[in-house]
Amino acid sequence: MKRRNFILYSLSTLFVTILGFSLSSDCAGYPSEEKKAIKAAMKSVEKERDRMGTESLWKSGPLNGGIGVLSIRDWAYWYKDGVVYAANGLAMSASPKLEKSPGGIDYFKIKAIAK
């Protein structure tokens, strides 16, 4: 009986440890630079009610030496060297303090690379 309890305790501890680790890893599955880009875009959204706090609602991919980021609401952002830019009107409305992305970086290019 004691051995059975020990095994159950060990297995449950292992399960909780693995579960805790997987829940604590932000943007699981994304390379670290893409994590930063997604977090920067998320933080730029002005109104709390419009924020989408789940990384799974965002897609990203490399674009012109930076990272293109797209939300499920079609907010398009471009992130490079620690700076996030709005790449379409929807993103500019959600994040009015951001500068517009440089020429050649737009919603359609970001949508094409976002995965």
Image (cartoon, rainbow, N blue to C red):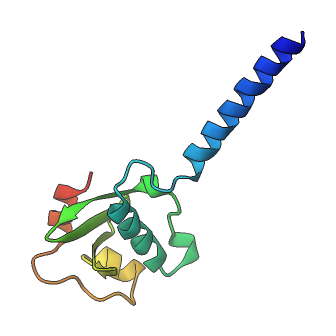
Q: Left or right: 111 with respect to 55?
A: left
Look at the picture and state if 85 lies above or below 74: below
Residue 50: give x, y in percent of width and height: 51, 71
Q: Residue furthest top?
A: 1
- Lateral position of residue 66 relative to residue 92, left or right: left
Q: Residue at x 35, y 87 (%)?
A: 98
Instruction: Identify which residue is drawn at 29% across, 81% down.
Output: 85
Q: Is residue 37 left or right of residue 48?
A: left
Q: Nearer the viewer, residue 59 or 46?
A: 59
When the figure is inspected, residue 18 is found, relative to residue 79, above or below; the finding is above
* Res 102 seen here: yes
Q: How many dots with numbers?
A: 0
Q: Position of residue 9 (x, y in %)?
A: 79, 25
Where the N terminus falls, by quadrant?
top right
Give left or right: position of 5 versus 80: right
Residue in front for this viewpoint, 92 or 101: 101
Is residue 73 visible to the viewer in this orientation of the structure?
A: no
Residue 67: name its quadrant.
bottom left
**Residue 18: x, y in percent?**
61, 38
Q: Position of residue 111 (x, y in %)?
A: 21, 59
Which quadrant of the structure image shows residue 33? Answer: bottom left
Judged from this view, the residue extending furthest toward the right is 1
The answer to whether residue 114 is above or below residue 97 is above
User: In the figure, 17 relative to 42: above or below?
Assistant: above
In the displayed orientation, state which residue is furthest to the front.
3
Q: Residue at x 59, y 46 (%)?
A: 21
